[in-house]
Image (tube, rainbow, N blue to C red):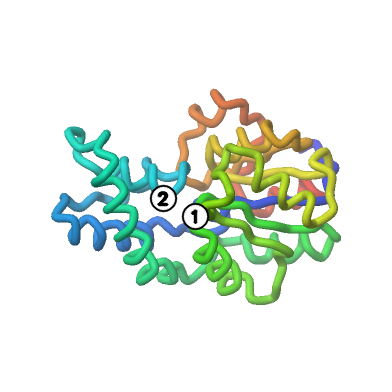
């Protein structure tokens, strides 16, 4: 692997640092129950992730209701509450992630998280999963902060941490992670293959640096 020069490494959360799919599915099915809608499988939820909670809710609807904004809004309102009951069911990171993140921090990289998950849940999960404070900042979705692939959150992280976008790298498992790096003018984007999105789709979005194990990040960032 060719090493990448960078100062700031921004990680996605879901499908990159931790497998959160069961907790998301549990919260979503509670919301679907309350709305009188059919439950969804883990695989259906996994395929629907990546574009924020509202789009996730829309993708849960039966085809005849897909364009019904009122039902989407109601499901989102309920899901924001029910996921609050289940999101901390994610109890550990992917194997190898914790040691890799600690080593990257030891090597002097500034680490941050940018997720399309709700901001409060991102902050709480990162505090739990990384209790030693490896990440300097963790940003999730808020009404004021546009979701990836909009570059606003990524650029806000750079400004707050005093790092030029040209010295930042996005590390994630989805097409939104590739595109946010492109839109923000980052020096590179690294795609992990253990997440939720198929590699062919990621390649079609411009992903060209892949890692199959967390430890391979240590070969890219010396």
> Residue at 29% of width from left, 46% of height from top?
72
Q: Are marks 1 and 2 in contact (CB under 8 Å)?
A: yes
Count of numbered circles in the view: 2
Q: Is residue 45 left or right of residue 222?
A: left
74, 33: nearer the viewer: 74
Secondary element type, mark 2: helix
Q: Residue furthest left?
A: 36
163, 208: nearer the viewer: 163
Q: Which residue is mark 2?
A: 53
Q: Image quarter for residue 34?
A: bottom left
Residue 118: where, in percent of width, then height? 49, 58
Mark 1 → mark 2, Cα distance in angstroms: 7 Å
Residue 106: where, in percent of width, then height? 82, 65
Q: Which residue is mark 1?
A: 117
Nearer-N-terminus badge (1/2): 2
> Residue at 77% of width from left, 47% of height from top?
219
Observer able to see residue 3: no
> Residue at 52% of width from left, 66% of height from top?
120
Secondary element type, mark 1: strand
Observer able to see residue 201: yes
Residue 93: where, in percent of width, then height? 54, 64
186, 204: nearer the viewer: 186
**CA neighbours of label 1 inside 10 A, class few (<14), some (14 to 19), many (20+):** many
26, 66: nearer the viewer: 66
Q: Is residue 198 left or right of residue 5?
A: left
**CA neighbours of label 2 inside 10 A, class few (<14), some (14 to 19), many (20+):** many
């Amino acid at each position: 692997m060719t090493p990448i020069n960078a100062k700031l490494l921004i990680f996605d959360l879901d499908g990159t640092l931790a497998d959160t799919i069961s907790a998301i599915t549990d919260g979503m099915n509670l919301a679907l129950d309350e709305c009188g809608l059919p439950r969804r499988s883990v695989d259906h939820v996994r395929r629907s992730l990546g574009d924020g909670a509202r789009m996730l809710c829309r993708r849960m609807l039966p085809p005849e209701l897909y364009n019904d904004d009122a039902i989407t809004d109601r499901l989102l309102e309920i899901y924001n509450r029910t996921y609050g009951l289940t999101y901390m069911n994610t109890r550990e990171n992917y194997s190898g992630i914790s040691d890799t993140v600690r080593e990257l921090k030891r090597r002097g990289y500034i680490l941050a998280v940018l997720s399309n998950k709700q901001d409060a849940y991102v902050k709480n999960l990162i505090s739990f999963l990384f209790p030693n404070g490896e990440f300097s900042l963790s940003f999730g979705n808020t009404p004021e902060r546009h979701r990836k692939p909009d570059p606003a959150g990524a650029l806000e992280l750079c400004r707050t941490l005093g790092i030029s976008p040209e010295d930042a790298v996005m590390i994630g498992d989805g097409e939104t992670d590739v595109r946010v790096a492109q839109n923000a003018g980052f020096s590179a984007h690294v795609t992990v293959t253990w997440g939720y999105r198929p590699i062919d789709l990621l390649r079609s979005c411009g992903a060209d640096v892949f890692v199959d194990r967390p430890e391979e990040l240590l070969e890219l960032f010396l």
